[in-house]
Image: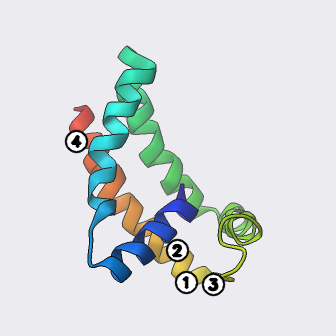
Amino acid sequence: MLALAYLTVLRDRRDCADELATWPVNMWAALQDKFGAAARSLAAAASSGLQDLLSRSVDFDQALMIANLGLLASMDVDREAFRATAERVRAEVLEELVELAS
């Protein structure tokens, strides 16, 4: 998710758009469609899961390495940029997702 968010932010900047702002509503709709009654608990778990990742340096570094070997391979994203993306996803996407699920 963080690699896709990083790419979305880059495209938003290039295109003067804000597609990332649509993620919470789209994620909530997808969770409801796919998981029905379990959607609320899954939305809450996503937020706490990202917070856990941010608090565990080894896990965060591994996520960055996987992203740099995969979707972000041609970009060699550094730790600070990846962390900034994660913080933005937490604040702008997952917090709103939790509110939508409440």
Q: Can residue 38 be spotted in the picture?
A: no
Q: Is residue 95 left or right of residue 34?
A: left
Q: Residue at x 37, y 41 (%)?
A: 27
Label 3 or label 2, whichever lies nearer to me, is 3
Q: Which mark is residue 78?
A: 3
Q: Is residue 72 left or right of residue 46?
A: right
The amino acid at mark 4 is Glu
Spatial CA distance of label 2 from label 1 is 5 Å
Spatial CA distance of label 4 from label 2 is 23 Å
Proximity of marks 1 and 3: CB atoms separated by less than 8 Å: yes
The quadrant holding residue 55 is bottom right
Earlier residue among tags 4 and 1:
1
Which residue is tagged 1?
A: 80
Element at label 4: helix
Residue 38 coordinates in the image, percent (x, y): 42, 19
Element at label 3: loop
Q: Please state, as top left, top right, bottom left or bottom right, where the N terminus lies in the image.
A: bottom right
Q: Which mark is residue 83?
A: 2
